[in-house]
Image (cartoon, rainbow, N blue to C red):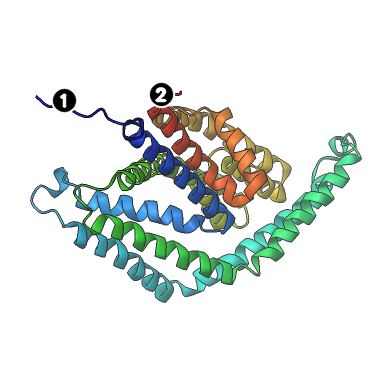
Amino acid sequence: MTPKPASSPFARSTPRFMTASAQGLALVLCVLVLVYGLLPGLLAVCLGFMATQALSTPSARWTRWRPSTLVAATVVIVVPLLLVTLGLSNAKGMVFSAGAQYEALLHHLAGTVLEIRQKLPPNLAAHLPDELVAAQAWLAAYLQSQAHALTGMGSAGLQGGLLAYVGLVIGALIVGTPGVSQPAPLRAAVRQRGRYFVGAFRQIVVAQFWIATFNAACTAVFLFGALPLLDVRIPYSSMLVALTFFAGLIPIVGNLLCNGVLTLAGMSVAPMVGLACLVFLIAIHKFEYVINAKVVGKRTGTSAWELLTVMFVGEAIFGVAGLVAAPLYYAYVKRELVEEGLV
């Protein structure tokens, strides 16, 4: 009987080498996405992939009829175009005036910051330190600069929207295009990295979506239900609710931003209204901590200090894009480390 030839060390190490190569490629792509401003496209790729997969995956909802992956991909590609067309035709003024309204909101908040001392009771204002004046001036100037920056975001917003739609199409086509039944080792390793990344996206973004929805709904009830009963109306309430939702998609930092903006908006009416907004936010966030612990923490095994650390580093290196991408990248890296048995 002829003995089998001994396998070479290279052959035994080939799977590990392919995995390491795919991980290195994923790392390079993640960095290039931030360097070249492609983050909206990357997030849209994950969203398109998830939506197409959800439509074409068998479930109780599709027991009688389940669309093919090609049909599901077509739906994901065409429906956003129809929604944008209907939105622009029926709410054109609201869509194009959103930037102007947010610009006016920032100017309003800047004026409120400068008038804080005048709005407080005289006996309380007398105890405020003189250094607060410099802080007020800096914050007001920052808000004014952000308001002026919004005037030039039309083309950037259009470019980001087109990039996101292209990413959505790519994500849908990845599911809708038949794959190779027996892929080569490197291709299989790259696919596995993609599955891990989409899984991290599902954990972070889906959980944060429900948290942002909860925050926005509570804020809407507070601004349009509770305060009007006391004959109190805060300016730009609709914009504040929308800001609460979109900023709430960013873990932790987005909630801190909403807290500051809503409290300042309440201060523009009266100090007691600002205090009521702050008390409301504290109460809501007590519930939010429970949701975060149940949803985000359970799904990703990530603590608040971990998220804050990676978001701080991401923002310091890549700006706002790094801030948004940091939780997603961290969840992906942690998944890789768990699969390697390192954490």
Q: Residues within 10 Å of mark 2 (few under 14, many from 20)?
A: few
Q: Position of residue 102 (x, y in %)?
A: 62, 61
Label 1 belongs to which residue? 3
* Image vertical order of residue 200 relative to residue 237, above or below: above
Residue 277 in sight here: no
Q: Residue at x 35, y 30 (%)?
A: 9
Q: CA distance from mark 1 to mark 2?
A: 35 Å
User: Label 2 amino acid?
Assistant: Gly
Q: Position of residue 269 (x, y in %)?
A: 69, 50
Left or right: 114, with 198 as reference point: right
Task: Work out whether residue 300 or residue 273 is closer to the camera in this orientation and state it.
Answer: 300
Q: Residues within 10 Å of mark 1 (few under 14, many from 20)?
A: few
* Image vertical order of residue 90 relative to residue 180, above or below: below
Q: Is disc 1 placed on a helix, strand or loop?
A: loop
Residue 212: numbered disc = none
Specify the quadrant of the image occupied by residue 211: top left
User: Label 1 amino acid?
Assistant: Pro
Left or right: 132, with 7 as reference point: right
Q: Position of residue 330 (x, y in %)?
A: 50, 37
Left or right: 76, with 17 as reference point: left
Number of numbered callouts drawn: 2
Q: Position of residue 317 (x, y in %)?
A: 65, 46
Label 2 belongs to which residue? 341
Q: Residue at x 40, y 65 (%)?
A: 166
